[in-house]
């Protein structure tokens, strides 16, 4: 039986028991490389399903001023709100699909893979709604399958078909700078609002 991946209790339990096997304990190198190329420090940035928020900490350390984090786990949100490195971020305990604000940039880092595949079309539609007209989504997707889930995997062809109705796909390619455990298993992508 598959877990309800939109359940606060399910995710809070995983964080309390440290059973989030794909947590790297650091910001993802492909994302830090991307962030290092951004020049507008006032971009409205959202990280949905933010997990332990390593990328958010990195953004704040680089001088970004408008960072919003969302996670469905009340336990995790409470932990993040107590982290002095995240005092300048806005941290929301919320279901991503209930969020209605707009952003210039949405960073994807293991949120998509945490959602059951039956929610992927809704994810694409809602991401489109949350983006400003010139906004973009950038991040990582697993380019592999998993025996047990979450995380849920996939492949480039499936992702292109999913996103094409809503976004211009500026980039979707194998990562050259993944951490060793994810080498040849990640795609970096950038989507622009259509």
Image (cartoon, helix red, strand yellow):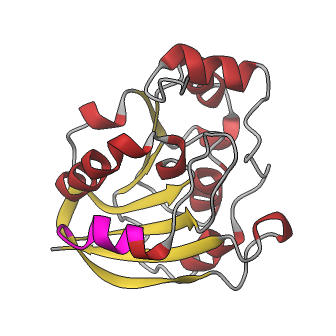
Q: Quadrant of residue 15?
A: top right
Front in this rendered view, residue 104 or 194 = 194
Picture residue at 77% right of the left edge, 74% below the top: 183
Q: Residue 165: give x, y in percent of width and height.
A: 17, 69
Residue that appears at 57% across and 60% down: 59
In screen coordinates, is 104 left or right of 185?
left
Residue 113 lies, with reference to residue 141, above or below; the image says above
The mark tally for this picture is: 0
Q: Position of residue 147 (x, y in %)?
A: 70, 46
Q: Is residue 106 left or right of residue 55?
A: left
Position of the N terminus, as image quadrant, is top right
- Left or right of 127? Residue 178 is right
- Note whether 19 is above or below 138 in the view shown: above
Of the pair 120 and 109, the residue shown nearer to us = 120
Q: Quadrant of the C terminus?
A: bottom left
Going by the image, does 162 lie left or right of 117? Answer: left
Residue 32: give x, y in percent of width and height: 64, 71
Inspect the magenta stretch and tell me whether residue 164 lies in it: yes
Q: Position of residue 176 (x, y in %)?
A: 70, 86
Q: Is residue 84 magenta?
A: no
Residue at 64% in and 81% down: 175
Who's the residue at 27% across and 51% down the image?
121
Report which quarter residue 150 is drawn in.
top right
Check the image and name the residue furthest to the right.
180
Name the magenta segment's main secondary structure. helix
Q: Which residues are magenta?
A: 158-166
């Amino acid at each position: 039986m598959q877990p309800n991946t939109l359940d606060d209790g399910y995710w809070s339990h995983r964080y309390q028991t440290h059973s989030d096997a794909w947590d790297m304990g650091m910001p993802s190198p492909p994302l830090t490389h991307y962030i290092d190329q951004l020049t507008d420090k006032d971009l409205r940035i959202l990280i949905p399903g933010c997990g332990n928020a390593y990328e958010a900490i990195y953004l704040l350390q680089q001088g970004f001023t408008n960072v919003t984090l969302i996670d469905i786990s009340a336990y995790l949100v409470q932990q993040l709100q107590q982290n002095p490195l995240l005092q300048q971020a806005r941290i929301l305990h919320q279901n991503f699909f209930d969020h209605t604000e707009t952003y210039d940039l949405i960073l994807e880092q293991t949120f998509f893979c945490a959602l059951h595949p039956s929610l992927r079309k809704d994810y694409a539609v809602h991401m489109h709604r949350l983006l400003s007209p010139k906004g973009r989504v950038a991040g990582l997707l697993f380019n592999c399958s998993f025996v047990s889930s979450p995380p849920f995997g996939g492949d480039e062809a499936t992702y292109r078909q999913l996103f094409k109705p809503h976004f211009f796909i500026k980039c979707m390619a194998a990562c050259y700078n993944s951490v060793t455990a994810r080498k040849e298993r990640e795609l970096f992508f950038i989507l622009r609002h259509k």
